[in-house]
Image (tube, grey):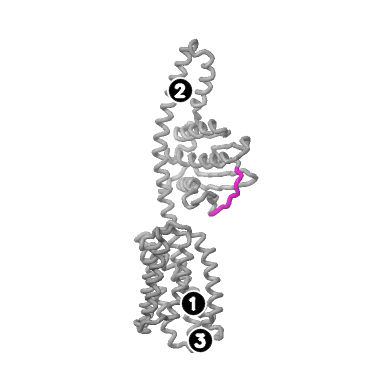
Amino acid sequence: MIAFHLSPFIVLIQLFATTGILLFYQERRSYFWPRLLVTLTCVIGLNFLWGFFPPELDTVAYALQFLLIVIGIAACFKLNFLSALFWGAAGLTIQHLGYSVMTLVGGVVPKLSYSLIIMIIVFTIVFISEYFLLTRKLGRDFELKENYVYLTIISLVAMFTTTFLNSYRMNFAEDKALITITSIYSIICSALSLALQLGLFEKTKMEQEVLVLEQIIANDRQHYDDSMQNMEMLNMYCHDLKYFLRRNADEVGSFQQQAEKFLSTFDAEIATYNHALDTILTEKSLYCANNDIQFTCMADGQLLEHMDTVDIYSLFGNLLSNAIEAVSSLENKERRMISLTLRRRNDFVHILIENYYDSQLDFHNGLPASTKEEAHLHGYGLKSVRYLVEKYHGNITISADDDIFRVNIMMPIFCHINT
């Protein structure tokens, strides 16, 4: 029979809301609104066909409704089908959690059973909590890996099992104890499924982050090779030009002193007895000298002999790049100062870098959150530093007090590398 069915429509609205809140920051496809309209038309059309499903197959009808929503997510947002399945499952779990809380209240207080006011109150709390506790922290650019699909399927099986249980218990609507027990069971299942999905999200996100960091270090390897060639070529040219100026002092005249002073800037190679460290420190000190930044350095490069050459270049390159970016934005040029110390403390290498800053910093997981737009695409510099420090069994502490930003690193001098 073709007719409008209220209960599935209410569930549809709840599910659309919980899923929509989760997807709030996801990147949309072109023609998003027409795509969304088509999705709504399909799922609402299914509602009018609900009467063709016998009551005992309600769960199948809800599964079909869920499948249409997942297809709609993949059509409306820049997500593959597996990722759309993940977000749809998370939305279903939250919707079911809210529904179970609502029926539990109705079981405890029969007068409030399926009350519109209770439903509005419960789901308003659910929606607000979902946005602030989940959506704002989950971010975007999530792609579910194929080998994790089974975990999402486990969550879906749990949800549809409880959906079937909820449908079946309607035959015993007068048994308040049964409603209370099954509601509590549904809440526990929903909470565990949500925890499983969030854990899956965090694990996948961390693996993606590690891949990005490894790519950054691979790029640093190429950058290091290029810098070595450029530095050697620059030193050779500086040496030849100085020799030319001295041999032709009469012709060059007063220009000789000015030219040699200029060349000494490029010939001021920092010597720490570690080739990779010398290269990056020289490179960064030249940049500082040409951009009104005072850079002071006391470093014993021999303490880093246990580290891979590219890791040294990447570690100090990211540390100094972060400091240079911070001081470059300072209007007061006298505060554009960076200090780097590398020394031995007992059996540890102690690295301390300090610089002034003037922005408001918020810390997340021990690292300052990026203040740039598209923050999810930035902030990998210090993440890369932490990744490398932990690779060598070290510890990093970052603080920002009295307008001074400090990065403290302690690494054991003798260690086996984490692989």
Of residues 296 and 265, which is closer to you in this image?
A: 265
Residue at 42% across / 82% down in the picture? 167
Q: Which residue is mark 1?
A: 100
330 left or right, relative to 312: right
Which type of secondary structure does the marked residue at label 3 adopt? helix
At label 3, the amino acid type is Lys
Numbered disc 1: secondary structure: helix
Q: Position of residue 150 (x, y in %)?
A: 36, 66
What is the x, y in percent for residue 384? 47, 46
Q: Which residues are magenta?
A: 357-364
The amino acid sitting under disc 2 is Cys
The quadrant the N terminus occupies is: bottom left
Residue 72 is situated, as x and y percent measured from the top left of the image, at 38, 66
Label whose residue precedes the other's in the sequence (1 or 2):
1
Residue at position x 53%, y 44% from top? Answer: 410
Location of mark 3 (residue): 176
Judge whether 31 appears above or below 418 on screen.
below
Q: Give residue 238's mark.
A: 2
